[in-house]
Structure formats: structure tokens, C-alpha cells
Amino acid sequence: MKYLKWLPLLPVAAFPFMIWLVGTIEEQTGVNPVFQVALFWLLGLVGAAAALWQSIRGRWEGRKLALASMLVKLFQIQNYVVLFLGGAGLGLLFPPIALFLWLLDVMTIFLTGLVGLAAVFRCRVEGRLTTKAMVVNGILQFVFCADVFSAIWVYRNTKEAFLS
């Protein structure tokens, strides 16, 4: 039962990978790809909001939530690389594709940023981060590339509560 709190993070982690299935799902079911992406994103949003809510209510230990945030962000790196290279290459031929891929990146960073924000908040409440570190890392959770470094920093620097 203690692992159930990790369940809401699955749609957050899987969102950018589900995008690659959109064409296949459309072929088999006829469901509009935009609707599919919106549905997958909403599932991720529910998962990220659940993690944030659990953080506020104290259901997560800050360090474990920081680990979850870091793992989700690291898990998605290869997808960002493919989206970036695909957007750069296809964007030269067809600019709307680059815009669409950029939008998908923004949607993904928002989801993982909420999980990172939940971790930073919980670590601050537990005295594992200073207020300044909470604010800086809370902002960095929503900045492309900096979010990964911030998640790693938060996890590495929250071993012991230093404000107790």
C-alpha cells in the first residue's frame, strides 16, 4: 500500500512517451490526435496535482519526493533530445511542426515542474532547504534544462535537515 502514492507520477513520467503512440492510436481508433494529447496531458496534470496535494498534506517525505522528481526528469531526457532534434530538423522544412514540438516540451516541463515544486516545498517544510533555496529551485523546476540540474541538486542537498 505504501507504493500507491507513486502511482500518480506514472502519467507524468509517461506523458512525453505517449505522444509517440498518438498516430498509432489514431489509425486504430480514429480518435483525433489533438484530443489524445490533451487527454494524456490531463492525466499527467491530475498525477502532478495529486503529488503536489500529497506534499502539502505531508504524505510524502521530502527526500523521497525529491528522488521521484529527479527520476521523472532524468527518465525524460532522451525524449527531450529526440523532440529537440526532430523539431530542429523538421522545423526547417515545416515550421508548424517545430511550434507543436515546442508546445509539447512546455506541457511536459509544466507537469514535471509541479512534481519538482512539490518536492521543493516539502523539503522546505521539513527544514531540508532554506527559503532562498526553495524559491530559486521552485522557479528552476519550470526552466528547460535547468530543471534537471535543480532536481539533482535538491535531491543531493537534502540528505539531512539542516534547519532543525
Image (cartoon, rainbow, N blue to C red):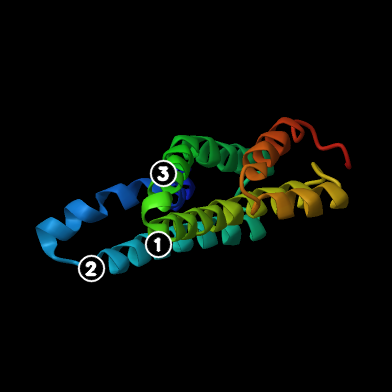
Tell me: 154 left or right of 111. right
Q: Which mark is residue 32?
A: 2
The amino acid type of the residue labelled 3 equals Gly
Q: Which mark is residue 22?
A: none
What residue is shown at x 46% (from left), y 49% (from top)? Answer: 9
- Based on the displayed image, in which of its 4 quarters is residue 66 positioned? top right
Marked residue nearer the N-terminal end (1 or 2): 2
Residue 19, above or below 154 = below
The mark tally for this picture is 3
What residue sits right under mark 3 in the picture? 89
Looking at the figure, which quarter contains the C terminus?
top right
The amino acid type of the residue labelled 1 equals Pro
Q: Label 3, label 1: how many angstroms apart (C-alpha)?
A: 12 Å
Which circle, 1 or 2, is nearer the viewer?
1
Tell me: 103 left or right of 29. right
In the image, farthest residue toward the front: 93
Q: Position of residue 8 (x, y in %)?
A: 44, 53
Looking at the figure, which quarter contains the N terminus?
top left
Tell me if mark 2 has few (under 14), some (14-19) or many (20+) residues whose alpha carbon lies within 10 angstroms of its own.
Answer: few
Tell me if mark 1 has few (under 14), some (14-19) or many (20+) residues whose alpha carbon lies within 10 angstroms of its own.
Answer: few
Describe the element under mark 2 as helix, strand or loop.
loop
What residue sits right under mark 1 in the picture? 96
Q: Label 2, label 3: how many angstroms apart (C-alpha)?
A: 25 Å
What residue is shown at x 66% (from left), y 50% (from top)? Answer: 141
The amino acid type of the residue labelled 2 equals Asn
Residue 143, above or below 152 = below
**150 or 59: which is nearer to us?**
150
Which circle, 2 or 3, is nearer the viewer?
3
Marked residue nearer the N-terminal end (2 or 3): 2
Q: Position of residue 29 (x, y in %)?
A: 12, 62
Q: Position of residue 97 (x, y in %)?
A: 38, 57
**46 or 19: which is nearer to us?**
19
